[in-house]
Image (cartoon, helix red, strand yellow):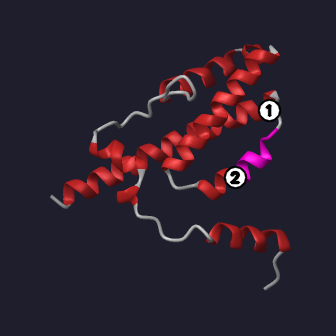
Amino acid sequence: MLSSPKSNSNLTFLSGAGVFDWAQSRLMEDVLNKRDKFEGNDDIYSESEVLDLIEEVKLNQKTLRGPDKMRSVYQKAFETLQELMLQMNQHILFQMIAKKYNEVNLDNTVKLLVRCKQLLASRQLVFKTLEGIMEFEK
């Protein structure tokens, strides 16, 4: 079977992640403390902020038109995505995404927000799964 060198290198790169123990994750801390919503701070968006911002951009893309506003949203979305991916043990994948979306522009800013939304949905699923496992193990 033939495959491209690019896919081989990505496969090797991703396979270096090894085994992950969810019990040692930051997401498990949230499960133990019953924090099902992803909370933001000055540097990262909360779950509701990501969803609201996406809706705002859908209604009017000029929301991000100013260079300062776009840079601010891009940076905070980037930091939010990084935090979400670290919670989900996606360190290596985040490095690849960071390289892909390194330019501050409207397209990349929106894509970062959408990736945050997708990871928030994934986080909810993993949260519920871990919560269910803990309940089962009682």
The numbered mark at residue 24 is: none
Amino acid identity at mark 2: Gln
What residue would you read off at disc 1?
107
Q: Does the magenta stretch include residue 65?
A: no
Label 1 is placed on what type of residue?
Asp
Question: Measured from the top left, where is residue 32 in percent x and y?
Answer: 28, 45
Location of mark 2 (residue) = 95
Q: Earlier in the sequence, mark 2 or mark 1?
A: 2
Q: Distance between the residues labelled 2 and 1?
A: 19 Å
Q: In the image, is residue 97 part of the stretch drawn in magenta?
A: yes
Q: In the rendering, at what x and y percent does residue 66 appear?
A: 80, 13
Q: In which quarter of the image is residue 35?
A: top left
Tag 2, which secondary structure? helix
Residue 65 horizontal/vertical position (percent): 80, 16
**Where in the figure is residue 70, as x and y percent of width and height?**
75, 21
Asked whether residue 61 appears in the rendered view, the answer is: no
Numbered range of the magenta stretch = 96-102
| Mark 1 Cα shell of 10 Å, populated few (<14), some (14-19), many (≥20) | few
